[in-house]
Every structure is written in C-alpha cells, then in structure tokens.
Amino acid sequence: MGGTMDGTKQQRRRGNTRQRIQDVALELFAEQGYEKTSLREISERLEVTKAALYYHFKTKEEILVSIFEDLVRPIEDLIEWGRRQPHTLETKQEIIRRYSEALAGAAPLFRFMQENQATVRELRIGSMFKDRMMGLRYILVDPDADLVDQVRSISALFTLHAGMIFLHDVEGDPEDKRKAVLEVATDLVTRAHHQGAGDS
Amino acid sequence: MGGTMDGTKQQRRRGNTRQRIQDVALELFAEQGYEKTSLREISERLEVTKAALYYHFKTKEEILVSIFEDLVRPIEDLIEWGRRQPHTLETKQEIIRRYSEALAGAAPLFRFMQENQATVRELRIGSMFKDRMMGLRYILVDPDADLVDQVRSISALFTLHAGMIFLHDVEGDPEDKRKAVLEVATDLVTRAHHQGAGDS
Amino acid sequence: MGGTMDGTKQQRRRGNTRQRIQDVALELFAEQGYEKTSLREISERLEVTKAALYYHFKTKEEILVSIFEDLVRPIEDLIEWGRRQPHTLETKQEIIRRYSEALAGAAPLFRFMQENQATVRELRIGSMFKDRMMGLRYILVDPDADLVDQVRSISALFTLHAGMIFLHDVEGDPEDKRKAVLEVATDLVTRAHHQGAGDS
Amino acid sequence: MGGTMDGTKQQRRRGNTRQRIQDVALELFAEQGYEKTSLREISERLEVTKAALYYHFKTKEEILVSIFEDLVRPIEDLIEWGRRQPHTLETKQEIIRRYSEALAGAAPLFRFMQENQATVRELRIGSMFKDRMMGLRYILVDPDADLVDQVRSISALFTLHAGMIFLHDVEGDPEDKRKAVLEVATDLVTRAHHQGAGDS
DNA sequence: CATGAATGAGCTTTCATTCAT
DNA sequence: CATGAATGAAAGCTCATTCAT
C-alpha cells in the first residue's frame, strides 16, 4: 500500500506472516466458505508453501479459531459489561448499539459465521459462538416476557446480523444502512421491553 | 403418494428410490451441510451403491436442485399470486402469513439454505433462491419508503427465516412459536407500511 | 473375455485385483517394511491408481490385516487342535513340527512380522499375533517347570521364527535347512519336557 | 559420571545436550520404532527446537548411528577378543556369557535393533550390525559342523536376543531370567560343540 | 434398475532438512 | 549454542464421477 513499503520486494517478510495468513484466510473463507477454501489456495495467494501455514498454525481449523478469538474479543467485553448492568431498557439499547458497532468492526468474520453455520456448528468456534449468543440473549431476553416479546428481542439480534449481509445489494452509504438497521433493532428491543414492562 | 402404496414395506422399493434419495440427502444436507455430506454417505444409508445415485441424478448438485424445485413450488406460487395483487398492507400481511406457512412446510430445506449460504451461493440454487427473495422483496418493500422502513420489511422476512432455526432451543410448542414469530413479522411489515404511508 | 486366460493384455483384470494388491503389498512390506512402503508404490507396481486400493480396502492397515487373517488361519487351526490335546511330549513335538510347516507356508508374512515388530505392535495385528503366540506358549510351556525349561520352550518357538530369516544367508537347500531348524526346536522342547518330567 | 556434576539440576544443561538427545531418541526409537519417531517429538520432549538437533547431528540417521557406535563398543571388544582365542568350547561359552552381559548393558538399543530389523537393514547401522553378527558367528559356528549344529549355535545367539524381549511378560526377577536364558544358550552352544567334536 | 471397479484431482497433514541470525 | 521461519516432497485418504455389464 502507499507510503513506507519496503523496496526490497516481498523478500524479507518480517514477522507478519502469521497475520497475513489470518487476513487472507478470512477473506477467502468469507468469500467461498470454509470447506471450499483449501490451504493450497491460501498459501499460493501468500506466495509461501502450504507447509509454512503449518509452521504458524497446527491445523486448518486453528487458523479459523485464531481469527475468531482475535476478532470476537470486543463482543466478549461487551457481554461482560452487560452482565454486570441492571437489565433495564437503557442497558439493552446500549448493548444493541455497541453490538452493532462491534459487528461492523468485524464484518467479514460475521458474514462468514452467518453464511457457514452448518460448517461452523461442527467446528470448535461453533460452541464458542453459541456461548456468546447465549450471553447476549440472557441480557436482552426477559424469560418471563411473553413469547412474542422474546421473539422480538431475538429478532433484534438477527436483524443486526442479517442486516450486514442482506443490505449488501441495497444502494446507499454503508454507515447510513448500519444506522437504519440499528434503529430497527433498537425499536424491536424497545417494544419488547415496554410491552413486557407494561404487563407486570 | 397417491394410488398403489405397496404393502411390502420398503422391501421391493419399486419406483420410489428417487424419492428416497431426496429424503435422505436433504436430511443429511440439513444436518451436516452440503460439502460435508458425501454421496458415499447417502448411498450407504440407503443401502444402494453410489452408482445408483447416478442413475437417478446426473450430479450431486442435481440432487439438491431437484429437492429445491419440488419444495419451493408453493413459494413460487405465492410470489406469483402476490405479484398480481395491489401492494396494500393487507396483501403484505397475507404474504407474510402464507410465507410463514410455506417455510414451516419445508423447514429442513430452509434450514439448509440458511445454514449453507456460502455454499449455496456458488450453486445453481443460489440464484434461484435469490430470485425468489427478490420477488418477495419487490412485493413487500416499497422502494420509496425511507431506509428504516425498508429494513423493517426485510427484517420481517429474516425474522421468519431465523425464527425456524433460533427457536429450536427455546421451550414451547412449535406451532405457538411459529405464531409468535409470525406476529412479530406481521408487526414489522405493518409498521413499515404505516409509517411509509403516513409519510406520503 | 475369450476362453480362459485373456490374451487382450492386462486390460480386463477380472476379479483378482484384491488378491493382487495383497500379493504385491506383502512382497513390499516384507522387503522394505510397512512404513516405508507407500500406497503409491503398491499402486504403481499394479498399474492402478491409489484410489483403486481404497476401493478394495478401507485403510493401509486393513490391507495388512487382510493378509494376516488369510495366512494365519492354519496356525489358528493348529492352536485350536493343540488346545484340545493332552499336554504330552508327543503333542508338543507335533505342534512344533506342524508350526514349522505353517511358517514355511507363510514365510514372507512371518519374516515381515519378525522384522517389523515395533510397527506391528501398534497395529491391529499386533495383538492378534500376540494372542496366537500366547496360545502356543500355553500349550508348550509348563508353568510349573523351572525357569530354564520355560526358556527352552520359548526358545524353541524362537528358533523356528529366526531360522526362517537368519538362514537366508547360509548355503544349502531350503528344505534341508528347515529340517535342521525343526530338529533343534524339537530337541529343545523335548529337553524342556523331560527335565520337567524327571523333576516331579 | 565422574568429576563436575552440576548441582543445578538440568537447568543449565551445559554441554550435555548431545547426550540428552541420544537418550531421548533411543527411548523413543525403542518404544515406537524409528520411522514413527519424528524429530519434532524428540525436540519437544527435550524442550529445544528441531534445529537444535541439527546443530548436534547432521541427520536423523546420524543420531541413531551415534547411539549405536557408543553402545556397541563392548561387543566389538568382545569380538576382537574372541577372534584371537582358539575356538574351543570354553571360548564359546565365555563369548556367550559376556555377550549376554553386553546385551543386558545396552538392552534398549538391542530391543530396538530386534524390533526394527526391516528399517535398520536400510540404514547404515544395518551393515554395521550384520558385521558384528558375522563376527560372532565366525567364532561360534564351526563351518564343518553339520547343519543341525550350526543351527544350534545360531539359535544360541537368537535365544539371547529374543530372551531379552520375550521374557518381558514372564514373571520373575530380571537377573534370574537373564541367567536362565544364558543357561539355555550355553547349553545350545555346548551341545553344538560336543556333537560336532564327537563326530570328527 | 442398479452394481462393481476404477479414476483423477484434490485434500489436510507430516516429515526431514536448511539457513540466516 | 541455538532459534525462527520456511521449504519440497511425500504421505494417507476422500470425493464426485464414469462406464461396461
């Protein structure tokens, strides 16, 4: 890219190979799916040998896990934070807002997770991800609310997830779209809360 | 289905092999994903040889396509119907209601589609499915509505899709859950319409 | 096609491929060891693809197991027979005699077993073989005999095994050598028995 | 051994790394076989890198050769001694006795040699070992004796080798077992000699 | 209506080895 | 005295697919 590129070709690739593997892998995983992306493909694009990948990661799955662990940290922090707050409407709205941001920050990973659920389910990150979702659910969904409101809360989460993907082919500025999605999600969570609250 | 059901169990599997292949394939595709399901696995479970599958279908993909075509017909009909109606709120609500039913009637296929998007995208059914979605979108989403309401409509569709999957691990009668999901979706589409209408 | 043997090259290789795989595999296993013999090597020598091997056998190990099972049957029968006899000297001598014949009949396999013990130990046939050995031991070795005589009996077995291999590079007619080895083994088992008997 | 034993445990592993590599390698080779033991495994167990092994040895094979050379010296000395003695019965008995001791002193190596013959044959130590065996044979076996007696002598050697391994699963004090094996071997060599002698 | 036998391409993974630092 | 990073070769194995019978 611009600026301080080393003039010495790509010969001495410093210590960044591990990172480069993760970047390329995520790109390809998101584009083609996990199974259809071979290590050959990744290594060719990096101009290293397949064996080099194995110097940095023990298995193909480990590449994915490492990406996941790195990118999912903000969400873990968010859940941790949410867990310690009172489950008020304000907390929920804040969670939704911050979750929307977190998703935007790791869009390719979440697109991958969304589009490869069947695969991911069998992988180690499957349960990791499920745990995170359960964490959010625990905060957002009031187990005593009626079923419709529970669905509303879950739908808020899903709207955020799907929004990232299914608005790809809608015209408009990405940030505007994200805001629109966020508003719908916030609305859903708000309605879920009010009606639940008004009931008791 | 109709007519001459054989009393001899599945012993003499007359002409139903094609159907049985589709059933088993869909089951496995939904359970494990498309790539991870091999023709060997399918044929073993049916106690026929792999070559037998090729007597009935030209390729692995064709098995999937045939399942898709069979199960997606009701939705095609629905879209066809919707296209000829005025795009009133009532039409939209009716579409949502009938779509919810159609989804319930072909749950495993849609679960599969949802969980294997990355794979499906590269397959022939990818574009077929996308076309259907676009059809629904054309009916439900008013291109002049503001972005938030567009998202609301799309979110309604998504809520239906996701509902099938993510309510798996919520307690409660499946039909109740479907109704709850339907209500939220209807609500979303209604709000999208009203606000859009009130604007103009 | 025509007549008995086909004159048409090796094109149509009837139904004997499975057998041919076993033959070539045993030859190479015995010559180079199990680990150093690759499936590529086997398939190349047979002028088929590696995948063809996998049509006939599920794994590399299974090739070996199948060879073992076929060739070890006579020894199993022998043990079965021995088990039902009284443990007299005559029985023991007969066992030794017939075991010597059995070994000669499956020489490459036993050479392989002898020379690849470390490998075989981790494989499925390891325990199979050990069981056979224990069976013979149970018949030949009197647990009340003194240690030296126990060693003599075991040494008789070993002499038979080793004879096959270490006489390779001694001049002389193979059948003569086998006879000589048999005589030493018989002698050992006889001395073990007598001295044990004279004790009581 | 003598002199500067370090009191600091194995913390500062001074100059003993070479030795430690040999120890661990022999342990693993004997346990799992040569091919199945990877340099990665050895280096991990030593908590050094694979590259460190290459600082001390040029190849994997060289590690084995170095172990062999160190441990086989007593046997070389024994053969050297035997070669200069008259080939009397007493010499032979003495050879057997001292060989038994030498084997006990390098048990893991010989267990390895015994259990990895197929591998060892292709390696440099294969011919080294064969040469030693030939040396012993030259001393113990009278080429003019009849075949049976030749077998007896060779069987004596084999009894010593195999005894170490196949008595593993017999109860009893190791030293007692060694003595018993030695007695049988001595007996074999004695009978070989007498009968041969009595003949002429 | 189906099978038996086989293929070609590709996969993930492991290994011994090298070399600049 | 040793490591970090990488390679080239090969291994065992699986897959969708083909075709004569």
Image (cartoon, coloured by chain):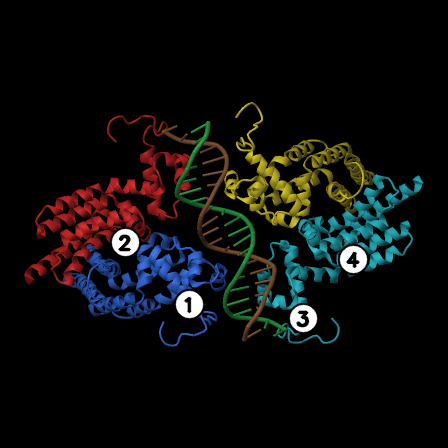
Chain colours: A blue, B red, C yellow, D cyan, E brown, F green
Counting other residues with Cα less than 10 Å from the Cα at mark 3, is it few (<14), some (14-19), or many (20 or more)? few
* Residue at 48% from the left image edge and 59% from the top image edge: A50
Q: How far is disc 2 from disc 3 in space, using C-alphas?
A: 61 Å
Instruction: Look at discs 2 and 1 and give the one toward the viewer.
Output: 1
* Residue extending furthest toward the top: C3
Circle 4 residue: D102
* Residue at 54% from the left image edge and 32% from the top image edge: C13
The kind of secondary structure element at disc 1 is helix
Q: Which mark is residue B166?
A: 2
Could you say which is closer to the camera, residue B160 or residue C30? C30
Q: Mark 2 belongs to which amino acid?
A: Phe
B32 to C94, vertically: above or below: below
Circle 3 residue: D16
* Figure quadrant of residue B106: top left
Q: Mark 3 belongs to which amino acid?
A: Asn
Do callouts 3 and 1 point to residues on the same chain? no
